[in-house]
Image (spheres, rainbow, N blue to C red):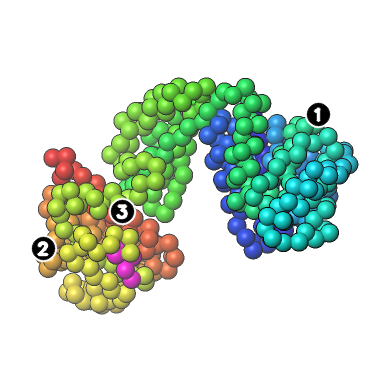
Amino acid sequence: MNVEIVTIGTELLLGEIVDTNSAYIARQLRDVGVNIYYLTTVGDNRERIADAVRTALHRADVVITTGGLGPTVDDMTRQGVADSVGRSLEFHPELLEQIAERFRQLGSKMSDNNRVQAYIPERSIPVFNRLGTAPCFIVEADEGTIISLPGVPREMKDILAASVIPYLRERMGGKGIIKALVLRTAGIGESQIDARIGDLETWSNPTVGLAAHTGQTDIRITARADSEAEADALIAEAEAIIRKRVGDFIYGTGAESLEETFVQLLRDRDLRLAVSYTGPEANVFESRLGGAVLAASVNEPDIARTMQGLGLVPGAPVQDFSELSRAEARRLRDESGADVTIAVVTDAAGTGITALTEHGERSRSYGFGGADTDAPHWAATWGISMAWRLVRQIAED
């Protein structure tokens, strides 16, 4: 079964609010075996809503809309959905009574304009909204099925769980499940991972995909099956191959963070860490690692002072940022006595990153620097990942 989600509201197009409904619906439907190939957003306009729903019906079995079911003039979802399948709106007195009862429970008086909420497309299935005043509905037509939900997240989530997912499960015969596993990597670029597992990315079930973040890349394995055990088996097969090819760079799964993994490793090995960051954003390491494992921390916004401390000519062009970061890492190690040292030296011309232990050293340089707003976090991530790999090798030895 294929579903398209259509979120309705001009405020979404203006950036006044962020659409969280689509992500939530997509996640819930994924877990019951539903494909989602398109997400659409349209403003509060009757004709455009109808056009968006018609387009969605051409490429999906089921269209789920959110938003636009309120009582005000700009709430046009009821009319737009009815237009999309050539139907009129019809009045449901039982829905009006539900709305009135909801207002009585809230101790409020129902306005006359709430009456419009009791009109839904003819021959549609009413869906009760126990948390709000906007009735929902399901339209079953020759073109496909339309399920209209409120835009209020709390109401949408309740109706999705109580009514929509059971309805879709029944449509699918109660079968089908999609499971996913995310392998978190660090210290390796997206293109390098792709070079190692590109053949797996062509698989149809399970599917393997990459998602790059600032200095990290996730590998997502998604499997579809008739049972959870079958899905787990498909994921395990792909995971084993991926770990064989890029396992040295996988630090965790799911929501595990690189910082948490690294800090725990330091604690397990009883190792002290020292960090040095020369660049425009102070405390970039402390904010991510906390102070519990830090033996020393140096934050220097002026690269000239770092160079002076290393006996170099302040203000002179830096020929090799990696060499500068290596010198800074060694200086900090000698002064602090730390077991693990990370040094990042950056300015607008470039960045050098070094991780150092008594057992080894990793260093690299890049041709971008502190003028890039992501540079401090990107460089810190690489520094942590390089140190994590060095410390893990000590643990394995």
Amino acid type at circle 3 is Glu
Rounded to the nearest angstrom, the CA distance separating label 2 from label 3 is: 22 Å
Rounded to the nearest angstrom, the CA distance separating label 1 from label 3 is: 53 Å
Instruction: Residue 142: give its label.
Output: 1
Amino acid type at circle 2 is Gly
Instruction: Give the residues drawn in magenta, as a range.
Output: 282-286
Amino acid type at circle 1 is Asp
Instruction: Residue 337: give its label.
Output: 2
- Which of the image's four quarters has the C terminus? top left
Q: Residue at image x 84%, y 59%?
A: 112
Reading the chain from its start, which is encountered first: label 1 or label 2? Answer: 1
Rounded to the nearest angstrom, the CA distance separating label 1 from label 2 is: 74 Å
Point out the frontmost of discs 1 and 2.
1
Q: Which residue is mark 3?
A: 259
Characterize the magenta stretch by its predominant secondary structure: loop
Reading the chain from its start, which is encountered first: label 2 or label 3? Answer: 3
As displayed, is residue 27 above or below residue 113? Answer: above
As displayed, is residue 285 above or below residue 125? Answer: below
Element under disc 3? helix
Bin the neighbour count of mark 1 within 10 Å (Cα to Cα): few under 14, some 14-19, many 20 and up.
few
Q: Residue at image x 32%, y 50%?
A: 258
Q: Are marks 1 and 3 in contact (CB under 8 Å)?
A: no
373 lies left or right of 352:
right
Q: Residue at image x 39%, y 49%?
A: 216
